[in-house]
């Protein structure tokens, strides 16, 4: 069971790995560990209602009360968690339809770290509460307060014509109404909640948003937004139907917060240098964290940072300590009006960065040895390099050039990412590091 734990929570194949029995045990363990009232919601996956009900049974069996939201975006669960002991979302976010998961929020509405799940799984009790100490289950009707909260963040004065690709996910029940209540015109796609995600799949990738691009061009819309299966990630298309780089979107939003409030922002070790470039242009500073929104939030709290995010479209703001795609969309509209620009102008004046990725198969039992040896050899091979061990090994040079060597947490792989302003240098460095990784691994295999 512990192999299912990551920064995203407990996640795996629905029913086979994330089973009703596991959900009941997690609910029981959580209730026994911290008796209280918990909000529970789920995404559109076919297995989600069954798993949510099992988790509620576990909470009640341990003596805790539950408030059931039913179908709800994950950020809505986080929002309502703040008035109770915490909350649990049954979701696998952007993963394929046959996956599911358990994501726990504390009473701040913040994602708990992986160690929390490990403790839950290690301390599953053998007994239920007595008959007169069992918890109760309440049904909450609608997400009206959450939608009102989103609308309260809108500072736009004009009416925007917005295309939204909901991907058949949980934002189907919140995003169209939210934008209309904010006074905008909405042109939705994939509007029906469907756990098989027939429209384009649960992840809003650039190559899956051609229908949204056509929608924008056909109807002369101002902007397009797309969300993942549970609504915590955002992708943006400009007024011409062109995809706005996630790195650029993250960097511009970080710059916006620094411009208005000052201070610093947090991004993970895999984020592009364009973020640092934009933040520094407004006098701000950038801190790096491990990959995963719980780690982003931890570093934000440590640094008293004003904003944090990852280049998958998951951003954390002072408004809610959980990524929220619709909330992020509202802030993007605020940004565009504040600067009086079109979405396509978010790319204006930025230097071109060339980013490449590679991966090398590596047995899980060798990962630690490979990374330890690379840590010793890299400073000799690349004199003057700045080496960071926040998450994997990150090499930094002058002029925003960097590389990241990071073992996969879910697969027998080590991933390499390189970014530079020089295309040929990027290719040379990715090739050099890939060869170094392969040679290091082969050398260790011969010794063992």
Image (cartoon, helix red, strand yellow):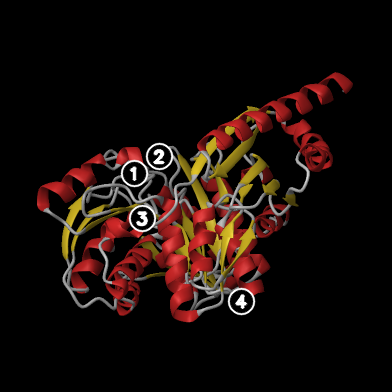
Q: Say which of marks 4 and 2 sits in front.
A: 4
- Residue 55 position, x and y percent, is 51, 56
Tell me if label 2 and label 1 are in contact, CB under 8 Å. yes
Q: Which quadrant would the C terminus be assigned to in this image?
A: top right
- Give me the residue at 31% from left, 75% from top: 338
Q: Residue furthest right?
A: 447
Q: Say which of marks 4 and 3 sits in front.
A: 3
Earlier sequence position, callout 2 versus callout 3: 2
Marker count (numbered): 4
Q: Which mark is residue 304?
A: 4
Earlier sequence position, callout 4 versus callout 3: 4
The residue under label 3 is 347
- Give me the residue at 64% from left, 32% from top: 413
Tell me if label 4 and label 2 are in contact, CB under 8 Å. no
The residue carrying pointer 3 sits among few (fewer than 14), some (14 to 19) or many (20 or more) residues within 10 Å by Cα, namely some
Q: Say which of marks 1 and 3 sits in front.
A: 3
Q: Say which of marks 4 and 1 sits in front.
A: 4
Is disc 3 placed on a helix, strand or loop?
Answer: helix
């Amino acid at each position: 069971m512990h192999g299912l734990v990551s920064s995203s929570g407990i996640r795996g194949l629905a029913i086979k790995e994330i089973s009703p029995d596991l959900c009941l045990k997690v609910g029981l363990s959580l209730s026994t560990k911290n008796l209280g009232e918990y909000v529970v919601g789920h995404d559109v996956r076919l297995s989600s209602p069954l798993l949510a009900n099992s988790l509620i049974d576990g909470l009640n069996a341990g003596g805790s009360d539950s408030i059931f939201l039913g179908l709800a975006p994950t950020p809505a669960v986080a929002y309502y968690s703040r008035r109770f002991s915490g909350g649990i979302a049954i979701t696998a976010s952007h993963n394929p339809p046959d996956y599911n998961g358990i994501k726990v929020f504390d009473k701040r509405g913040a994602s708990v770290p992986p160690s929390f799940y490990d403790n839950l799984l290690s301390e599953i009790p053998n007994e239920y509460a007595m008959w007169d100490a069992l918890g109760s289950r309440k049904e909450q009707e609608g997400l009206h307060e959450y939608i009102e909260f989103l609308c309260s963040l809108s500072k736009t004065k004009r009416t925007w014509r917005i295309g939204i690709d909901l991907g058949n996910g949980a934002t189907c029940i919140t995003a169209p109404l939210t934008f209309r209540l904010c006074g905008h015109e909405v042109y939705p796609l994939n509007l029906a909640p469907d756990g098989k995600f027939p429209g384009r799949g649960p992840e809003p990738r650039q190559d899956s948003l051609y229908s949204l691009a056509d929608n924008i061009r056909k109807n002369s819309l101002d902007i397009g937004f797309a969300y993942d299966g549970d609504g915590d990630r955002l992708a943006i298309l400009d007024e011409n139907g062109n995809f706005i780089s996630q790195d650029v979107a993250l960097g511009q939003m970080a710059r916006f917060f620094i411009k208005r409030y000052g201070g610093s922002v947090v991004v993970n070790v895999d984020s592009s240098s364009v973020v640092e470039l934009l933040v520094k242009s407004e006098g701000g500073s950038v801190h790096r964290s491990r990959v995963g929104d719980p780690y982003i939030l931890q570093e934000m709290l440590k640094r008293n940072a004003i904003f944090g995010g990852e280049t998958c479209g998951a951003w954390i703001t002072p408004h809610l300590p959980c990524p929220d795609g619709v909330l992020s969309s509202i802030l993007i509209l605020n940004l565009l009006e504040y600067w009086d620009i079109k979405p396509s102008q978010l790319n204006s004046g930025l230097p071109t960065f060339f980013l490449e990725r590679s991966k090398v198969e590596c047995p899980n039992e060798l990962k630690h040895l490979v990374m330890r040896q690379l840590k010793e050899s890299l400073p000799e091979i690349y004199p003057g390099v700045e080496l960071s061990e926040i998450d994997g090994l990150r090499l930094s040079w002058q002029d925003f050039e960097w590389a990241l060597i990071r073992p996969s947490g879910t697969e027998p792989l080590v991933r390499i990412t390189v970014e530079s302003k020089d295309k040929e240098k990027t290719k040379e460095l990715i090739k050099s590091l890939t060869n170094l990784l392969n040679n290091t691994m082969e050398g260790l295999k011969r010794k063992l």
